[in-house]
């Protein structure tokens, strides 16, 4: 089973308030795929181990410009809730995403919607 990191949103994952994630990869995902959510999967220091958060089931996958959540205000507001950041302005999310992922707002991202399977850590 493949691991998918939630390093920047561990709290939201554990509370199960996050149901969508955006990635600059994972282009081969399909609905019904299962993944193990983990705290961190790359850049582990010697002696560190992968910390499992819980199993997720992919519900929907689609490619869209990151900027869509800014251009469409109601969509952006709903997506911030699904991303686990209710009340966060979409422009702030886009800015932070671009900084951490070294991309531009108009770049395509992979929008991944998922559900939780069983209990999380």
Image (spheres, rainbow, N blue to C red):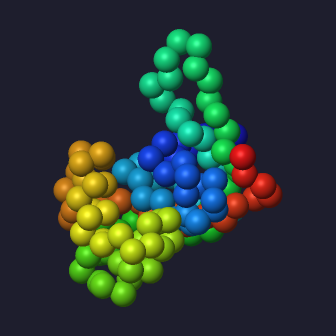
Q: 48 and 37: which one is in front? A: 48
Q: Is residue 106 left or right of residue 110?
A: left
Q: Horizontal and vertical percent for residue 55? A: 71, 51
Q: Residue at x 49, y 42 (%)?
A: 7
Residue 96 higher or lower than 85, as above or below: above
User: Which residue, as the protein is rendered here, is positioned at the far bottom?
Assistant: 74
Q: Residue at x 55, y 52 (%)?
A: 11
Q: Horizontal and vertical percent for residue 76? A: 35, 78
Q: Residue at x 62, y 46 (%)?
A: 37
Q: Quadrant of the N terminus?
A: top right
- Whether residue 52 appears in this view of the structure is yes
User: Which residue, as the protein is rendered here, is positioned at the far top?
Assistant: 46
Q: Horizontal and vertical percent for residue 105? A: 21, 62
- Whether residue 61 appears in this view of the structure is no
Q: Is residue 96 left or right of residue 60?
A: left
Q: Residue at x 30, y 71 (%)?
A: 90
Q: Horizontal and vertical percent for residue 107? A: 24, 60
Q: Is residue 5 left or right of residue 109?
A: right
Q: Is residue 54 left or right of residue 29?
A: right
Say how many tags the image has: 0
Residue 47 higher or lower than 79, as above or below: above
């Amino acid at each position: 089973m493949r691991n998918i990191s939630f390093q920047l949103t561990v709290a939201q994952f554990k509370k199960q308030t996050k149901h969508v994630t955006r990635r600059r990869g994972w282009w081969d995902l399909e609905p019904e795929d299962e993944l193990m959510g983990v705290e961190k999967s790359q850049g582990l220091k010697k002696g560190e181990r992968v910390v499992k958060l819980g199993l997720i089931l992919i519900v929907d996958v689609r490619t869209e410009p990151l900027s869509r959540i800014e251009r469409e205000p109601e969509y952006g507001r709903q997506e911030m809730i699904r991303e686990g950041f209710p009340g966060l302005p979409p422009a702030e999310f886009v800015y932070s995403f671009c900084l951490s992922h070294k991309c531009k707002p108009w770049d395509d991202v992979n929008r991944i919607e998922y559900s939780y399977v069983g209990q999380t850590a």
